[in-house]
Image (spheres, rainbow, N blue to C red):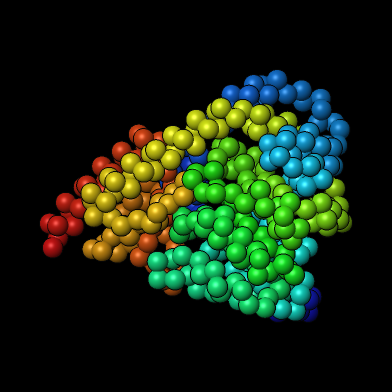
Amino acid sequence: MSAWEENVRRVTPYTPGDQPNRPKMIKLNTNENPYPPAPGVEKALRDFDPDCLRLYPDPGASALVNVLADYCHVKREQVFVGIGSDDVLAMAFMTFFNSEKPILFPDITYSFYPVWAEEFRIPYETPPLDEGFHIVKEDYCRDNGGVIFPNPNAPTSLALGASEVEEILRHNQDVVVIVDEAYVDFGGESVLPLVDRYDNLLVVQTFSKSRSMAGMRIGFAVGSPRLIRYLNDVKYSFNSYTMNQLTLRLGVEAVLDEAYFRETTGKIIRTREAARRRLAGLGFQSLDSRANFLFITHPEYEAKELYNALKKEDIYVRYFDAPRISQYLRVTIGTDEQMEALYGFLVRYEALHRKER
């Protein structure tokens, strides 16, 4: 080892899902939206003047902040935007979790959380989900340095109601509580209405799922003006220009088209519920999803073997080689046509499995 390596910060990095780019593949592994962005986004992209790129973007992202404030029924001083919700969440970890007490998040959850905690030297504890993979509210009522959890949770797809989240908030008014609502638009209950009641609540959402803009990287947070001011202080301390000109323009258009947003999220919810029924008919068990994916298991199949068999057919789902969930697959909801291709493969797989028995 070289001498300089003694001073290198070593971390165990987050491992993102596969991002294959193969013709005719069916990509159901990273919870992207199967439908294109709103028509206004496409028009703004066609009409974008590249001469704008000579200039630095608005460091305050004012146009996007303003439309988000109107959409969320809050003041503009209560909105923060960043390069995807991952960027917003990482900045929130850095800003708000600076106690010597451990922060709390579930044992089965978004796998970026322990990565950030270790990277920023934040102590943490992981209260276990119950046997049905639900968050146990009482586990978050003890002394801590902060609380964060996704709602709906990932990869389990299960959600707490707003009243249950508020119960956690009532017991944690001396620390910051972050609710990660990446999947809330697919049937969850947002706690955005609570931000004016609890000045320590930060709600984080993304454009990657329900607004079909994973490729543009837009995330945002809503909270009290003090929370947002602290977040901006940290942002301006290392990069004033986090959002580029094109992203800001397209992000505004994505928010403005509410009818298209409702149409596409409605399609995904209907396809999800149909998928639960079809998969149940094939012997799969799934949790009561409030997200744009299903968390499924089969009593007779090895999840990793099924994952690899699907991959050979260019059907990509997500497998987690982790305690308690190694027999589950996470399946993103695609178009009806994509889901039919999945069902067709599973029928053939079932026939092969019976033959081998």
Q: In which quarter of the image is residue 213?
A: top right
Please identify the quadrant where the N terminus is shown: bottom right
Left or right: residue 243 versus residue 137 is right
Instruction: Measuring from the top left, give residue 353's x and y in whole percent.
Output: 18, 57
Q: Residue at x 37, y 46 (%)?
A: 315
* One can see residue 141 in this view: yes
Q: Residue at x 40, y 66 (%)?
A: 132
Please identify the quadrant where the C terminus is shown: bottom left
Q: Which residue is drawn at 50% across and 30% down?
A: 263
Instruction: Measuring from the top left, give residue 14's x and y in whole percent.
Output: 59, 62
Left or right: residue 60 versus residue 335 is right
Q: In which quarter of the image is residue 356?
A: bottom left
Q: Residue at x 55, y 61 (%)?
A: 164
**Of 285 and 191, the residue lying toward us:** 191
Instruction: Measuring from the top left, give residue 271's x and y in whole percent.
Output: 38, 39
**Of 57 and 24, the residue lying toward us:** 57
